[in-house]
Amino acid sequence: MKNVTTAVKPIAKLVMAVGLIAGASISMPALAGKKLEIDDTKWISVGAGLRTVAKFTEDASPSGDDATDFDVENIRLYFSGQVHEYVKFTFNTDEIFGDGPVDVLDAIAQLEFSPSFNIWMGRMLTPADRIEMNGPFYGLTWNQYTQPLYPSDQGGDAGSYGRDDGITVWGTLGKFQYAVGAFEGVEGFGNVDDNPLFAARFAYNFLNMEGNPAYYTSGTYFGKAGNVLTLAVSAQSQKDGTGSEDSSGDFSGYTIDLLSETVVGDGNALTIEAEYKDFEADYTLASGPMTGDCFCLFDGESYYLSGAFYFGEKIGPGAFQPYVRYVENKPSDGDKSDLTELGVNYVIDGHNARLNLNYGTGDANISGYKGADVQSLSFGIQIQI
């Protein structure tokens, strides 16, 4: 591992950027989303979300020197509405990876009959593990995507940002939550018979219920949900979900995830988030078929553990939440990798307005396979209305 001191060379530049940006963000006027009520049962609401980051990475420039990058990671527009007591819709957009063009994120027709039974159809999140159900805006840590993800998070061939076209049945029975769906999954490649992807998530809330829409999740509630202890299992599978047209293979995977958040004292909260993931892919990123374009995935195990403490007493307009996250990936056909992230959230308005400063070191990445051993320092701003 490289000397930690070499990773803090750009700290002076970062501190200056933090001071300027934080000062500007604190002075911005407070905004709120808009809900237009048409009559007693019909309404439309609009909103937006933005995540932008400044990142300094050791020895990552083309010349081999330290690299400085400024990225807009997400810019989203949210639209939702109700046309009948039991009929709703959601339409969200995102500038994918901040590089454009603006694309459809969600487009959901929602039949919501009762808390225990609902049907969604369209483009939506496939039931999966907590970090994928969190999405980037509701995670505990800024860089939560450093382990392999399910097919619908592969950037287009089988969906993007965890979304895919399909149908999901979901609901809540007491403290038990379920979501079961069928989706397009990977199209083409080895899936010449057009087999669907099946996905499911089952969660039990031992203490307080998590207050999220549908089967979505959060990585922290900053103590506002009281004591939370939720254990969940998710699974996905698709016949011919890997490989090429000349040589197809199957995919299956399951995940066990846990969230514990305990209120400590007056407004403080201790948060623990953990996950174990196991993927089986007949064709992998390290050993694809000999011929044809391949939709290849990770095969092996992965896990992470995060811990955070939210200090409820505000300093200025917000409160601090320091955290640590460790992830380890173990591919069946490659070397294991790991990454440690140390960070702090400055929480102004929950997930709607927060700043993040974090330091990461290690060789784990979103592919699941070992990458370069790098050290990075980043500062991010997240805003939603």
Image (tube, rainbow, N blue to C red):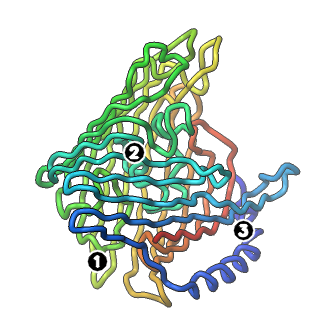
Q: Mark 2 to mark 3: distance in Å?
A: 38 Å
Element class at badge 3: helix
Query: Residue 335 at what x, y percent from top left?
Result: 59, 33
Q: Residue at the front extreme?
A: 39
Query: Residue 85 at what x, y percent from top left?
Result: 19, 57
| Residue where numbered disc 2 is placed | 125
| Residue where numbered disc 3 is placed | 8
Which mark is first along the chain, 3 or 2?
3
Determine whether 17 is above or below 70 in the image.
below
In the image shown, does 227 or 191 lie closer to the viewer?
191
Amino acid residing under circle 1? Val
Q: Residue at the bottom extreme?
A: 316
Q: Mark 2 to mark 1: distance in Å?
A: 33 Å
Determine whether 26 is above or below 329 in the image.
below
How crowded pointer 2 is (Cα within 10 Å; few <14, some 14-19, many 20+) is rated as many
Amino acid residing under circle 3? Val
